Amino acid sequence: MTTGAPTTPYTTRPRRSRLRRYLPLGLAAWLVLEIWLLTLVAGAAGGLTVFLLLVAGVVAGSVVIKRAGRRAFQNLNEALQRGGSPARGGGNGLTMLGGLLLMLPGLLSDVAGLLLLLPPVQKALSRFTENAVEKRLRTATPGSLGDAFQQARMHRPDGKVVPGEVIREDRSEPREQWPPLTR
């Protein structure tokens, strides 16, 4: 006869988020669709045409990424010379993402990359993303990334929020340095 805590053969695992559950399936479906579209175009127009489309996508994507990176660096340089902080966004991140999607082999990724190069799409997507992130930060639970942002603030008794950290020294004697500076 054994003694101890009763154990069950079944362990409870935490539930996986929808993103972690469906992302691999979505990526596999996207990959199959890309390959199917490339074979469809190759059957209709020929293999050389598909190869030239893929090479053109890589060249166009690299040009887009290079221009967006140069523009982002120039904006940062100008902001630092003015003494201010760099402006948020500016569309360079979405432009770089569009260039990266152009560089990926496949027709769907090319269409998505070209859509990301359009300013109205960039504005709508950045607004949507900003709202989604703010909503997530507002509903942050303890132990999450949003909670880390909330913990980085100290609340004063008068209601003002002061960013920073308080270090209290309770000793009146001088602190001993560690490691000792003399040997």
Image (cartoon, rainbow, N blue to C red):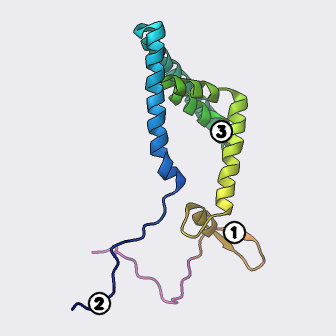
| Mark positioned earlier in the residue sequence (3 or 2) | 2
Residue 4 - label: 2
Residue 81 - label: 3
Q: Name which residue lies at 54% across and 26% down.
A: 108
Prevalent SS, magenta region: loop
Q: Amino acid at mark 1?
A: Val
Observer able to see residue 106: yes
Crowding at mark 3 (Cα within 10 Å: few <14, some 14-19, many 20+): few
Q: Nearer the viewer, residue 43 or 172?
A: 43
| Mark positioned earlier in the residue sequence (2 or 1) | 2
**Residue 89 lies in magenta, yes or no?**
no
Residue 162 - label: 1
Residue 180 - label: none
Q: Name which residue lies at 60% across and 62% down.
A: 146
Q: Position of residue 34 (x, y in %)?
A: 47, 26
Observer able to see residue 104: no
Residues drawn in magenta: 167-183
Q: Nearer the viewer, residue 141 or 75?
A: 141
Q: Helix, strand or loop at disc 2?
A: loop
Could you tell me how far apart the alpha carbons at marks 3 and 2 are, in whole angstroms?
70 Å
Cβ–Cβ under 8 Å for marks 3 and 1: no
Q: Position of residue 140 (x, y in %)?
A: 62, 64
Q: Position of residue 100 (x, y in %)?
A: 51, 30
Could you tell me how far apart the alpha carbons at marks 3 and 1 are, in whole angstroms?
28 Å
Q: Amino acid at mark 3?
A: Gln
Could you tell me how far apart the alpha carbons at marks 2 and 1 are, in whole angstroms?
51 Å
- Note whether 158 is above or below 28 in the view shown: below
Q: Name which residue lies at 53% across and 28% down.
A: 109
Q: Helix, strand or loop at disc 3?
A: helix
